[in-house]
Structures are given as C-alpha cells and as structure tokens.
Amino acid sequence: MTQRESAIAAGYAATRAAKFGAELEALPRVKQLITAARAAIVEAARAVTTTDAPRVVRELEAVAFSDIGEVFQSAPTGGLQLRPLAEWSAPTRRAVSSIKVRAGLDREGNEVTVTELRFWPKLEALKQLREQLGMTTPDGPAPTEVVVRVIRE
C-alpha cells in the first residue's frame, strides 16, 4: 500500500492520511517493521519459487522409475487389491498425480468401491531427467550405445 492507504487502513482521516502516512513511515520503529515485513515477503516468495537441483532430480526419478506393482498386494480371496496408502513408499506416492474413489454397484447390484489411480507420465519424466543429468546435447540425445541380445532356446 501507499503511505496514504496505510494511514487510512490504520484509522487516520482520509483528508490528512498522506501527511500522517509520511510521518509514520519516517519513525525508526515503523521503518524497522516495514523492512522486516518486506524481507519476510521476499523470503516466502523465494521459498515458493526456488528449489535445488537434487530435489528436482529426486522428483523426476520418482516418476520415471515408478512401479505400479508397489501399490498392489495379493487379496485374501485371490487376485489383487490396493495396498493401504500408508504402505506406499514416498517415491511411489509422489509418482501419483491423482486418486479418485467412488462407490457404485456392480452388475449383480452389490456395492463396490472403485479406485482410480493416475500416475504422472513416465516418458516425459525420463526425458526431463535425461536433460537434468546432462544426457542430452543441443542436437538430441547424447551418444550412447545400446546393445540388445535376444537369446532363443
């Protein structure tokens, strides 16, 4: 806010708010409080908008190397069931972009719960991870040799 707007917000009359605002801002204690408030705002903004490279790599790795098998377990009646969320590893939880749970009826009229999981795109995470790790060049992927052997018996 301007000095005038601050003085009005503090309860001073609008007709003399500009004068009082300037006088208040000149006080050493008010200057100190304004400086501290501005520093806190800048620090909060910096914390939200910046992160370190190792954390970016960890997040990309969580998505790129996620394994959907980690969220399932054998059901007592056979087949698979979803593990409780508390049993998922932290990287697996970070690889999930959304979870939707809805109740409904199956074809026989029995109540069922449907859980839909969506994971962040693995291929995009792999591409970004390659870039972060310097595995690409301006001309495309960095030169690597890939050998695939198919052995048939």
Image (cartoon, rainbow, N blue to C red):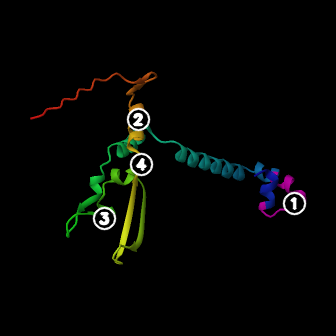
Label placed on residue 84: 3
Residue labelled with disc 1: 14
Q: Kindly report the distance in space between the C-alpha atoms of the residues bearing marks 2 and 1.
A: 58 Å
Amino acid type of the residue that numbered disc 4 sits on in the rendered structure: Trp
Whichever of callouts 1 and 3 sits on the residue coming sooner in the sequence is: 1
Q: Is residue 89 above or below residue 52?
A: below
Task: Check the image and name the residue furthest to the right.
Answer: 15
Query: What mark, if any, has residue 90 been given in the picture?
Result: none
Q: The disc labelled 2 sits on which kind of residue? A: Lys
Q: Quadrant of residue 60?
A: top left
For residue 120, the mark is 4
- SS under mark 2: helix
Q: Which residues are magenta?
A: 9-21
Identify the residue position indicated by label 2 in the image.
Answer: 127
| Residue situated furthest front in the rendering | 107
Residue 13 left/right relative to 114: right
**Residue name at image x 84 percent, y 55 percent:** 20
Q: Residue at x 33, y 62 (%)?
A: 85
Tell me the mark number nearer the camera, choosing from 4 and 3. Answer: 4
In the rendering, at what x and y percent does residue 51 appear? 48, 42
Q: Measure how far apart labels 4 and 3 are at the Cα level.
A: 20 Å
Asked where in the image residue 118 lies, by quadrant, the reply is: bottom left
The three-letter code of the residue at mark 1 reads Ala
First reached walking from the N terminus: tag 2 or tag 1: 1
| Circle nearer the viewer, 2 or 3 | 2
